[in-house]
Amino acid sequence: MSVKSGNPLSILKLHLHAACAATALLLGVGSLAQAADLNALIWCDHSDPALLQPFEEANNVKVNVKEFEGTGAGLAIVEQSQPGDWDVMVIDSIDVPRGVEKGLFEPLPEDKLPFADLFPQVKMDGSTVVGGKRYGITEKFGYNTIGFNKTKVDPADMQSLASLTSDKYKGKVAIYDYYLPVIGMAALAIGKKTAELTEADLPALKEELLKMKANAKLVGEVTASQTALATGEVDILVGGGEWVTAGLAKENPALDFSIPKEGAVLWSQSLAMFKDSKNKDMALKFIQYIMSPEGQARLATSSCYWGMPANTKAALTDDQKKVLRFDEQPGFLARAQAYPAPNGDLNKKMQDMWTEMLQAK
Amino acid sequence: MSSTGNSGRALPGTGRALPWALVTPALGWTLLFFVLPFVAMGFSSLTAHEGGGFTLSNYSQFFTNPSYWQAMVNSLEVTAIVTLLSVLLAYPFALILAEQVPERWQRLALMLAVLPFWTSYVVRSYSWLLVLAQNGVINRALTGSGLITEPLQLANTRLATVTGFVHFFVMLLTLTIFANLKQLSPSYRKAAADLGAGPVRTFLHVILPLTLPGIMVGAFLTFVLCIGDYITPQILGGNNELLMPQLVMMQIGRRGDFPLASALSIILMAVVTIAYLACARWLKIERA
């Protein structure tokens, strides 16, 4: 965020930010900053000890993690910290440019990372490469699609997004509470490409979202929507996918996901290194570990949520591959489209449209 | 506090300094953790999300976007229902505790009353979700007894949010009203009886008016805590309608729009201030 020197409001804001950052450091961050430590801003799947401990033991380092949900919240933590407090960050691949614009990230050395082993479709060069330099590496991906209980619904119906708005499943649907992927699904349902959405598409998208809402029992974040599907409160989760069903496969093998004929929305999370990291060597080692076959397998099957490893050589067991439908990925990826990546103004309008959908009776 | 009234007891040489020294930690705390953040939030609310610079648009959006306005309406409706229900349930409970339960059992009864405070707020809300769910205790009991054939939708509704809130706030109100009732001298009842008033008339014309301050304090606390709560509606309401705290969080989570979140928070705080002024005026707090 730029601060114009002539604007008294901005000057005051600058001082306030500095004061807030200093206070935050005194109160919270101070306890985690040791020279030998690695400080990581992460999603919950990275806090699994089964993932972190092998790295910590091998490198004699403590990985201090801070979980966040949503790029906005993550970037706010960074803004309220001192440069150098953080070493690595997990971020939505489509949001890597936001971090780059703020001057936060360090280009990654492509020759030291296994880019050749990644599924080609998830490299996401359009987002992870900015100005010819790569700032993020996709570590995990999956689909926002239809998650369902195959003993309660007709699996054949789940091959079409039209089922989500049909009377047959009224009151049996939950919607994942994240506007971008579900708007992406609405776009697919009306025959639009997620990458080509404009303001002119909003009325049609809104109509589709309202139809989904009319069928829905709830709109929930990760835990709520997962719980609703797992406990039988609903039979279908709009926006669900392997990230909901795979982790529960042992306890509830009836849960499954489909990639409907219209397609699905591809989610992808990346790792980025902070430009001001004081521990860049260790940060790179951490990224290399996460991208290694062993790290990828542990990340893919993290206790928080499962997802497809970006590395095709991930050391998954046959059972794990089966649950993740590893071998079907080429076909899935061919039909998947990326998250909508609206600019600031359209992003705001999409979120407002989502708010309107939530408020609809 | 009158400085002249205390001056005779002040230590030599301390004079006016001692009261200031005693009050400074509290003032410093308030300044550091309330005034400064509030000022920061105020300035943030006047800043454009994209590019910075002064703007009033964060406030104007609230008044021009019906979805935002609806969040405030929802919040006020839920808060009013919760406050009213909590008072109606807590008052008889506190009255029975104070006047019917023998003194030796009151401590145990009060401990039982505050048991819900011992559990985490999140755990308590999720517990209600399990009770109200389609396969929850209530629906199983109703379907099992043959009263209904299809489960009712209790979870993920406004009813669920209100239930979760009322469960918590009835306890809070019970404590404030109970304390108020215990402070009443038995002489009031005796005097009313001497003047020929029966139990109902005594309650309506003596006890109830005298416990009104306790009710209002409890009701105001309920109002403030309820209207600003994010957890309960988020877990129990199923996002089938948005309340103000959810709307505020929504601005931060994905887009990091702190200016708009700040403006919405200040508007919410203004509503709480209005509620306080209304209560203060009614309770004549300014005379204290």
Image (cartoon, coloured by chain):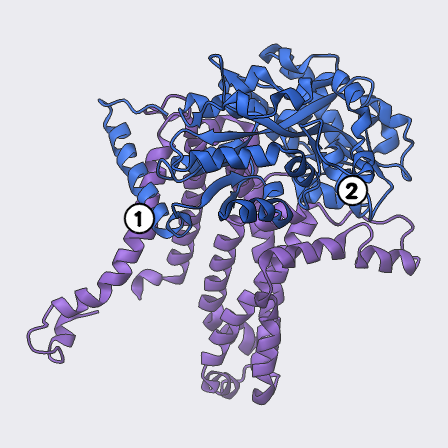
> How busy is the neighbourhood of tag 1: few (under 14 within 10 Å), some, or many (20 plus)?
some
**Taking the image as drawn, is residue A53 in sight?**
yes
Using residue B183 as the reference point, say whether residue A350 is left or right of it: right
Q: Colour of chain B?
A: purple
Chain to which mark 2 belongs: A
Which quadrant of the figure has residue B119?
A: bottom right
Q: Which residue is mark 2?
A: A229
Image coords of residue A338 (percent x, y) = 66, 19
- Residue at the spot x=87%, y=41% of the render? A254
Give the camera-side residue of A214 and A250: A250
Give the camera-side residue of A69 and A233: A69
- Distance between mark 2 and mark 1 Cα atoms: 44 Å
Chain to which mark 1 belongs: B
Image coords of residue B36 (percent x, y) = 30, 46
- Residue at the spot x=62%, y=75% of the render? B112
- Quarter the N terminus of chain B occupies: bottom left
Give the camera-side residue of A166 and A110: A110
Give the camera-side residue of B271 and A183: A183
Residue B129 vs B41, above or below: the answer is below
Q: Which residue is mark 1?
A: B35
Residue A165 vs A32, above or below: the answer is above
* Chain letter, colour blue: A
**Taking the image as drawn, is residue A207 in sight?**
no
